Every structure is written in structure tokens, then in C-alpha cells.
Image: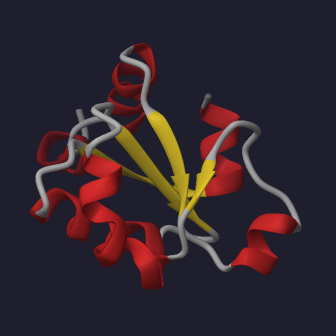
């Protein structure tokens, strides 16, 4: 086991656990980015709207996997949602996440 896996766990296993429990994929890119390609069935809320929509997202009552282009914005979105009581994981870039689903 590498130090990264020891410290942060295996992301692929966490993603599988979340998807097995009916997780919702939440894409936080801009509308133009989302419209140019996205994971089928994902929901779209741009990062700038996450705080305002956090209580609505919490009402989904499902685990959430955030994604964006590279993982930076989805990491910020995950932190905001987590602080609002949402069970969430940062899935990273949408294309690499799609390959793991």
C-alpha cells in the first residue's frame, strides 16, 4: 500500500461504494463546458451556485460525487457541500471519472 492510499484511501473504491449506493454525479463546470460534453445522467450546478443550492442538494438524500474539468472546482464544491452536511466525494475530472463508472 502506497503512502497516498494509506493517507487518503483508494478513490476508486470510494467511487464504487458511492455509485453502489445510488450516488448522484454533480458536474460543477460552467454551462458551456457542461453542454460540450458530460457524464450521461449527471446533474449540473456551476460551482458559483453550489453554496446557494446546498440545502436543495442535501434534500436529494443521496451521496454525491462532484466532478469538473480537472478536479479543482469539484474539490471546492465537495468541501462546500460537506460543510452543509452532504455526503460527498470529489470525483475529479469528469472524463477520468466517466472511465471509472
Place residue 78 in its image quadrant.
bottom left
| Farthest-out residue, top | 20
The number of callouts visible is 0
In the foreground, 82 or 52: 52
On screen, 51 above or below 3? below
Place residue 33 in its image quadrant.
bottom right
* Residue 72 seen in the figure: no
In the foreground, 60 or 66: 60
Q: Residue at x 35, y 38 (%)?
A: 60
In the foreground, 84 or 99: 84
Image coords of residue 51 (percent x, y): 29, 76
* Residue 46 seen in the figure: yes
Looking at the image, residue 6 sits to the left or right of residue 58; the answer is: left
Looking at the image, residue 79 sits to the left or right of residue 22; the answer is: left
Q: Residue at x 22, y 67 (%)?
A: 79
Image coords of residue 30 (percent x, y): 66, 80
Image coords of residue 99 (percent x, y): 70, 37
| Image quarter of the C terminus | top right
| Image quarter of the N terminus | top left
| Farthest-out residue, right | 36
Image coords of residue 72 (percent x, y): 45, 76
On screen, 32 above or below 83? below
Looking at the image, residue 83 sits to the left or right of residue 33; the answer is: left
Q: Residue at x 20, y 48 (%)?
A: 86
Q: How is the image coloured?
A: secondary structure
Q: Residue at x 24, y 58 (%)?
A: 55
Amino acid at each position: 500500500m502506497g503512502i497516498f492510499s494509506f493517507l487518503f484511501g483508494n478513490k476508486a473504491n470510494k467511487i464504487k461504494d458511492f455509485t453502489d449506493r445510488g450516488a448522484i454525479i454533480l458536474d460543477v463546470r460552467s454551462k458551456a463546458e457542461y453542454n460540450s460534453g458530460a457524464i450521461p445522467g449527471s446533474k449540473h450546478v456551476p460551482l458559483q451556485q453550489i453554496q446557494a443550492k446546498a440545502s436543495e442538494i442535501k434534500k436529494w438524500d443521496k451521496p454525491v460525487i462532484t466532478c469538473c474539468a480537472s478536479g479543482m472546482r469539484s474539490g471546492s464544491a465537495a468541501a462546500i457541500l460537506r460543510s452543509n452536511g452532504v455526503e460527498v466525494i470529489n470525483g475529479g475530472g469528469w472524463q477520468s471519472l466517466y472511465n471509472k463508472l
